[in-house]
Amino acid sequence: MWIDRLIDALRSLRTLFFILGLAVGWLLFADHQDADILYVTVHNTDSVMLESVRFEFGFGLTQSNILIVQIKPGEKRLVALNHPLNKGYNVEAHFAGGEVRSFCANRTYPERHQPLPLQR
């Protein structure tokens, strides 16, 4: 029966070495590096609504834009950027009433989870 063959295969020394080989191969050749992802917490610390926040970032040959809309006063939002650490990114914040703030953020911030308080 097939169940007897399965049990014999599981008891076999070859099966043990095959499973150990798979595990060692995974440990040696799998990509265990952290992905280049920044987690930015946008916090509207002002008393007016943030109509939009645009992130512009790039590295190497890639360039990306992310747009977040309508952040209420006191609200926080988490944004994931596919961007390396310590490279900085451009932020353009549009407040209610038409006021705009543009700047390069967190160029030398040492952690992957980065706060970004925004105020007029």
Image (cartoon, helix red, strand yellow):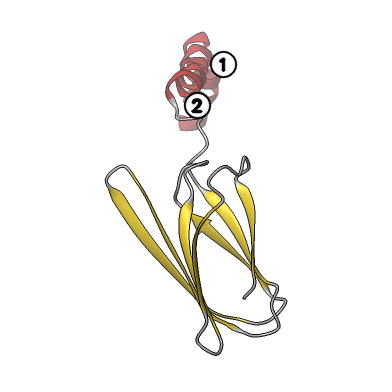
For the point 56% across and 50% down, the residue is: 106
Q: CA distance from mark 1 to mark 2?
A: 9 Å
For the point 38% across and 63% down, the residue is: 65
Residue 108: in sight, yes or no?
Answer: yes
For the point 52% across and 82% down, the residue is: 99
Inspect the image, locate mark 1, and give the three-letter code of the amino acid beneath it: Arg
- Left or right position of 87 against 50: left
Residue 95: quadrant of the picture: bottom right
Res. 11 mark: 1
Which residue is outermost to the bottom?
97
Res. 26 mark: none
Residue 40: percent from left, percent from top: 59, 57
Please report whichever mark, 1 or 2, sits nearer to the chain's N-terminal start: 2
Residue 68: percent from left, percent from top: 50, 73
Q: Which quadrant does the C terminus fall into?
A: bottom right
Inspect the image, locate mark 2, and give the three-letter code of the amino acid beneath it: Leu
Against 54, residue 64 (above or below) is above
Against 64, residue 60 (above or below) is above
* Disc 1 element: helix
**For this rendering, which residue is in front, 26 or 22?**
26
Res. 6 mark: 2
Crowdedness near tag 1: few (<14), some (14–19) or many (≥20) residues, C-alpha within 10 Å: few
* Disc 2 element: helix
Do residues under tags 1 and 2 come within 8 Å of each other at their CB atoms? no
